Amino acid sequence: TIPVGFLTYPISQAADITCFDGDLVPVGDDQLPLLEQCREIVRKFNSIYGETLKEPEQYLSNFSRVKGLDGNEKMGKSLGNAIYLVDDEETISKKVMSAVTDPDKIKKDDPANPDVCMVYYYHKLVNKDEEAVNKVCSECKKGARGCVQCKKELINAMNEFLKPIHDRRKYYEDNPEEVKRILEEGTNAARERAKITMQNVRKAMRI
């Protein structure tokens, strides 16, 4: 009754990391247990065959788990509370306008708590203007701004944040041959690096 993925996925992930001698892995905090499984596999292998594989460390950002627009602790496709990197401006606008704010703020000029507001949370995530973010926080607490205004400002900040990604995606959509070239070059480079790792593994295991 136990899916084979419980066994094979951690091993496959460990292979993906160790095959290329990965030493620093950018992950969300929900991936930390899987990374620790990788580290355990590396430690076990090295304890048997000598120091052959590198034990990776995690790299966490300031937002190691992004909350959903609905306030859920995790953004996810199945939860319907996510903004995708490919969302266009109209889609982003609709999603942001539905974001959860402080439920105790009834009127526009009511003081509110920005710490429970997803709009403020996303301002901190995508707004590059720190002064503007601080202004959002202070005005919210004083009741000097309405939620609609705050959401419209977030929409602008979100679109500005995602524009370079959208532009880059459009470029590669228009240049499929370059995408193919990059994939081929990356694959060849990966194979050469993996060969070195596998040579070391076979030597350590004497096979």
Image: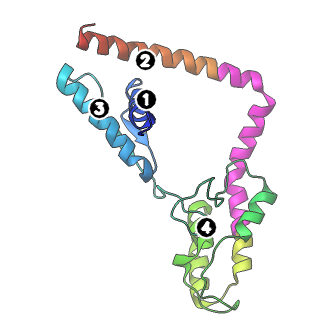
Q: Position of residue 52 (x, y in %)?
A: 26, 21
Find residue 41 and name its label.
Answer: 3
Circle 1 or circle 2, nearest the eye: 1
Q: Position of residue 191 (x, y in %)?
A: 49, 15
Q: Tell me the residue at 36%/46% (across/down).
A: 33
Q: Tag 4 or tag 2, which sits nearer the N-term? A: 4
User: Dot 3: within a 10 Å radius of its alpha carbon, few (fewer than 14), some, or many (20 or more) residues?
Assistant: some
How is the structure coloured here? rainbow
Chain part drawn in magenta? 154-182
Q: Tag 3 or tag 1, which sits nearer the N-term? A: 1
Q: Front-most of 8 and 205? A: 8
Find residue 123 and name its label.
Answer: 4
Q: Amino acid at mark 2?
A: Ala
Q: Tag 2 or tag 1, which sits nearer the N-term? A: 1
Image-quadrant location for residue 14:
top left
Q: Position of residue 60 (x, y in %)?
A: 42, 50
Q: Single out the residue that lies furthest toward the front.
A: 1
What's the CA distance linking mark 1 and mark 3? 11 Å
Q: Amino acid at mark 3?
A: Ile
Find residue 194 and name its label.
Answer: 2
Q: Tell me the residue at 37%/41% (across/down).
A: 35
Q: Secondary structure at mark 4?
A: helix
Find residue 12 and name its label.
Answer: 1
Query: Is residue 50 shown in magenta?
Result: no
